[in-house]
């Protein structure tokens, strides 16, 4: 909701700047019309992300009681078992296992809360999409790093391994903040009455 508000403001500001030029603001030579076209897409992206997040949380997770996620987690765990030696050598095994456990814990918590409060599905949707995205990227980077470490020793392979390790060290920890927020539920989000907007 906040992102959409920011992009609405940015779009309105871009249009206001365009109108300063009068009719010339719509002419390509000034460049202002390009800013307006560039900023417009953010509203579409945000709407699409919100829709995808609600679909993931509502239909694909809560409605199936986590069955689809369980299949995905089983795939990740199967990979981790098969590549345990390589993942451990790359220092990726423990962080990936912890990330998967966090994802399962959060999923179970949201599903349980949604039985008593359907607002929790919408409140959790966007952050849950981000959490699942971070865990999925970790899984894919772990796969790439294992392939790279098992192949010929090259600069390209070394780059894949280092990038995977960077992801695990600097980007994957963001799930901790997402998990903390997802544990909170929808009470504060839904606290305002309609007349307070």
Image (cartoon, rainbow, N blue to C red):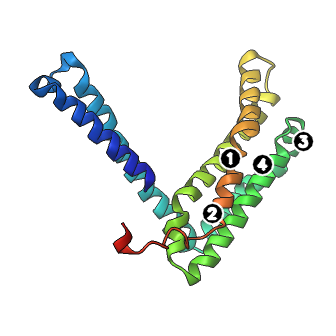
First in residue order: circle 4 vs circle 1: 4
Residue nearest the observer in this picture, 188 or 113 = 188
Residue nearest the observer in this picture, 150 or 108 = 108
Q: Which element carries disc 4, helix, strand or loop?
A: helix
User: Do labels 2 and 4 touch, CB within 8 Å?
Assistant: no
User: Residue at label 2?
Assistant: 182
Dot label at residue 174: 1
User: Do labels 4 and 1 touch, CB within 8 Å?
Assistant: no
From the viewer's perspective, tell me whether residue 176 is left or right of residue 46: right
Q: Which element carries disc 3, helix, strand or loop?
A: helix
First in residue order: circle 2 vs circle 1: 1
First in residue order: circle 2 vs circle 4: 4
Q: Nearer the viewer, mark 2 or mark 3?
A: 2
> Crowding at label 3, few (<14), some or many (≥20) Cα neighbours within 10 Å?
few
Q: Kindly report the distance in space between the C-alpha atoms of the residues bearing marks 2 and 1.
A: 13 Å
* Vertical comparison of 128 with 107: above or below: above
User: Do labels 3 and 1 touch, CB within 8 Å?
Assistant: no
Residue 144 spot, x, y in % from top left: 71, 35
Residue at the far left: name it: 23
Q: Nearer the viewer, mark 3 or mark 1?
A: 1
Report the residue at 79% width, 26% height from top. Answer: 151
Residue 59 spot, x, y in % from top left: 49, 69
Q: Nearer the viewer, mark 2 or mark 4?
A: 2
Q: Kindly report the distance in space between the C-alpha atoms of the residues bearing marks 2 and 3.
A: 33 Å
- Name the image quarter holding the N terminus: bottom left
User: Residue at label 4?
Assistant: 96
Q: Quadrant of residue 84?
A: top right
Q: Kindly report the distance in space between the C-alpha atoms of the residues bearing marks 4 and 1.
A: 13 Å
User: Residue at label 3?
Assistant: 85
């Amino acid at each position: 909701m906040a992102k959409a508000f920011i992009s609405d403001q940015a779009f309105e500001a871009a249009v206001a700047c365009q109108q300063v030029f009068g009719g010339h603001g719509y002419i390509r030579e000034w460049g202002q019309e390009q800013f307006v076209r560039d900023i417009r897409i953010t509203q579409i992206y945000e709407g699409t992300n919100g829709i995808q997040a609600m679909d993931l949380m509502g239909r694909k997770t809560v409605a199936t009681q986590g069955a689809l996620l369980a299949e995905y987690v089983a795939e990740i765990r199967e990979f981790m078992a098969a590549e345990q030696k390589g993942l451990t050598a790359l220092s990726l095994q423990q962080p990936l296992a912890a990330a998967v456990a966090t994802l399962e814990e959060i999923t179970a918590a949201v599903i349980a809360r949604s039985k008593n409060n359907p607002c929790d599905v919408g409140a959790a949707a966007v952050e849950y999409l981000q959490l699942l995205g971070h865990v999925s990227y970790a899984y894919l980077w772990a796969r790439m790093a294992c392939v790279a470490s098992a192949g010929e020793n090259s600069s390209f392979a070394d780059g894949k391994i280092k990038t995977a390790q960077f992801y695990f060290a600097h980007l994957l920890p963001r799930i901790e903040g997402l998990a903390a927020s997802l544990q909170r539920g929808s009470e504060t989000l839904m606290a305002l009455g309609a007349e307070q907007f």
